[in-house]
Image (tube, grey):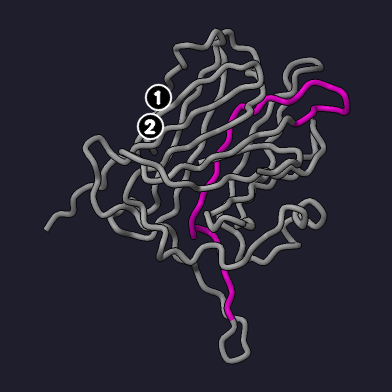
């Protein structure tokens, strides 16, 4: 996992549900969002996912230290052409998005953070980029990158690794989130909301054909060919700096049946 300063992310559409951890003495809570576009069985799709974190008291939540997103079984990663190039995290920190090939882009989004000082809560919504990262183990690695200007000036990266899962879930995106200092020596910022995509929507790749650079749209992950009762399930487990934890779940509705 990345040891650089890190913001966070991840990965439904209509309903959100939050399940606080029973054994935790903290009051963190979260809601999870997810959707497929298009939402059609067996189709190449763009996955949108995000979360919102808060506390029962209304104060800023503690900094997140880990996010484990469980994704539905049956999603087909073998035919995707996303991530034809690799983007190194060090390159992002030095040169930004311009330092990596367009063929390394997987998606994009935004993030909202809260700064625990000053008059009121400071917020920023930086542009969040999802890139294909290096993988020594052969698993899919996503590098999330954001360049913040105010109130926290920093270029931020973190890595998520896609691993096998079991039961209702076929894969999980596991991330470890190092602290992000608000100012040198100051308290860490709190992540409040994240939204991002993984998929071909609004992405343009390039290939060389007869010496010419030709644009094309990559193929995304395929939606499962069967939808379980209740929809395609997503669950996320969150860990916090104060030792607390919480879990949030949602589901992408089953596609509407076509009329004959």
Residue at horizontal 59%, vertical 83%? 208
Question: Residue 128 appears at what percent x and percent y?
Answer: 64, 45
Position of 220 with respect to 206 (left or right) is left
Quarter occupied by residue 100? bottom right
Front one among 78 and 163: 163
Q: Which residues are magenta?
A: 180-207
Residue 111 - label: none
Question: Residue 147 appears at what percent x and percent y?
Answer: 75, 45
Q: Which residue is mark 2?
A: 250
Position of 162 with respect to 129 (left or right) is left
Position of 171 relative to 116 (above/below): below
For label 1, the SS is strand
Question: Residue 27 appears at what percent x and percent y?
Answer: 54, 11
In reply to whether residue 192 is colored magenta, the answer given is yes
Q: Are marks 2 and 1 in contact (CB under 8 Å)?
A: yes
Residue 17 - label: 1
Mark 2 or mark 1: which comes first in sequence?
1
> Which quadrant, please, contains the C terminus?
bottom left
Quarter occupied by residue 7? top right
In reply to whether residue 55 is colored magenta, the answer given is no
Question: Residue 96 appears at what percent x and percent y?
Answer: 76, 55
Residue reaching furthest to the front: 137
Residue reaching furthest to the left: 260
Q: Residues within 10 Å of mark 1 (few under 14, many from 20)?
A: some
Residue at horizontal 40%, vertical 56%? 45
> Which quadrant, please, contains the N terminus?
top right
Disc 2/disc 1 C-alpha distance (Å): 6 Å
């Amino acid at each position: 996992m990345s040891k650089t300063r890190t913001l966070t992310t991840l990965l439904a559409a209509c309903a959100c549900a939050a399940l606080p951890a029973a054994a935790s003495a903290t009051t963190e809570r979260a809601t999870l969002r997810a959707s497929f576009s298009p939402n059609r069985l067996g189709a190449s799709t763009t996955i949108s996912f995000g979360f919102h974190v808060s506390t029962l008291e209304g104060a800023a939540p503690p900094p997140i230290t880990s996010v484990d997103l469980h994704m539905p079984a049956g999603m087909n990663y073998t035919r995707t052409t996303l991530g034809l190039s690799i983007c190194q995290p060090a390159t992002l920190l030095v040169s930004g998005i311009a330092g990596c090939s367009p063929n390394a882009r997987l998606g994009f989004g935004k993030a909202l953070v809260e700064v625990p000082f000053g008059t009121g809560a400071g917020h920023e919504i930086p542009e969040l980029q999802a890139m294909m990262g290096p993988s020594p183990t052969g698993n899919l690695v996503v590098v999330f990158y954001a360049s913040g200007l105010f109130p926290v000036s920093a270029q931020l990266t973190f890595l998520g690794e896609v691993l096998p899962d079991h039961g209702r879930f076929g894969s999980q995106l596991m991330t470890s989130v190092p602290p992000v200092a608000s100012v040198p020596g100051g308290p860490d910022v709190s992540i409040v909301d994240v939204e991002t995509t993984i998929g071909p929507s609004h992405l343009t790749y390039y290939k060389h054909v007869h010496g010419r650079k030709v644009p094309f749209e990559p193929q995304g992950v395929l939606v499962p060919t069967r939808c379980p009762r209740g929809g395609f399930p997503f669950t996320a487990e969150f860990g916090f700096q104060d030792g607390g934890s919480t879990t949030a779940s949602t589901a992408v509705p089953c596609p509407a049946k076509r009329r004959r």
